[in-house]
Image (cartoon, helix red, strand yellow):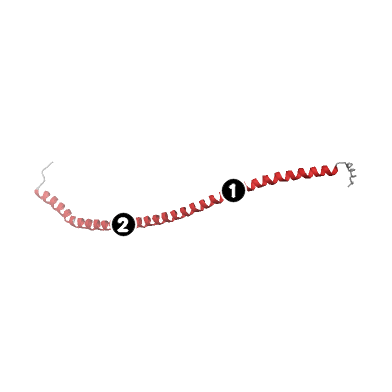
């Protein structure tokens, strides 16, 4: 490599300095853009905090409503259980009465048969009736 002349070195230095002259404007522009991004991030953060706070409030309200409805349903289920227990008792009572009624009907039936037998004692058997032709 041949040594560069002073003139070449000066020209190279001038080109470098000219390119560096615009650098402060670029840095200032970057500082402005960075500041804008920072304010946008802060605004986004604030909006997200407000949104999450709103969602938390909605969830809390929904939770309170659900608890109230669940407690109401528990009361209704308890009432239904009491009603079922009363119905079971009534059905058991009715089943017992039906059994008693069946027993009483059988005894009455046997009593009627006995009376019919007593009435027909000593009488001749009835003549069979002729059947009608159709």
Mark 1 or 2: the one toward you: 1
- Mark 2: few, some, or many residues within 10 Å (few <14, many ≥20)? few
The residue at which mark 1 appears reads as 89
Q: Is residue 73 left or right of residue 1?
A: right
Quadrant location of the N terminus in the rendered image: top left
Residue at left offset 84%, top offset 44%: 119
Q: In the image, residue 64 lies at what x, y percent?
A: 41, 55
Q: Residue farthest to the left?
A: 6
Q: Secondary structure at mark 1?
A: helix
- In depth, the one of 75 and 16 nearer the eye is 75
- In depth, the one of 93 and 34 nearer the eye is 93
Q: Is residue 70 left or right of residue 94?
A: left
- Residue 119 circle label: none
Q: Is residue 49 left or right of residue 22?
A: right
Q: For marks 1 and 2, give the CA distance.
A: 67 Å
Residue at left offset 71%, top offset 45%: 104
Q: In the image, residue 121 lies at what x, y percent?
A: 85, 41
Q: In the image, residue 18 lies at what x, y percent?
A: 16, 55
Q: In the image, residue 110 lies at what x, y percent?
A: 76, 43
The residue at which mark 2 appears reads as 44
């Amino acid at each position: 490599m041949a040594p560069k002349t002073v003139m070449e070195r000066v020209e190279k230095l001038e080109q470098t300095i000219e390119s560096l002259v615009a650098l402060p404007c670029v840095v200032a522009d970057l500082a402005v853009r960075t500041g804008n991004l920072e304010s946008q991030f802060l605004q986004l953060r604030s909006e997200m905090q407000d949104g999450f706070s709103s969602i938390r409030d909605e969830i809390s309200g929904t939770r309170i409503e659900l608890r109230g409805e669940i407690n109401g349903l528990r009361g209704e289920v308890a009432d239904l259980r009491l009603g079922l227990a009363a119905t079971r008792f009534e059905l058991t009572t009715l089943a017992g009465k039906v059994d008693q009624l069946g027993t009483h009907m059988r005894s009455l039936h046997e009593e009627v048969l006995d009376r019919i037998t007593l009435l027909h004692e000593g009488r001749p058997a009835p003549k069979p009736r002729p059947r009608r032709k159709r």
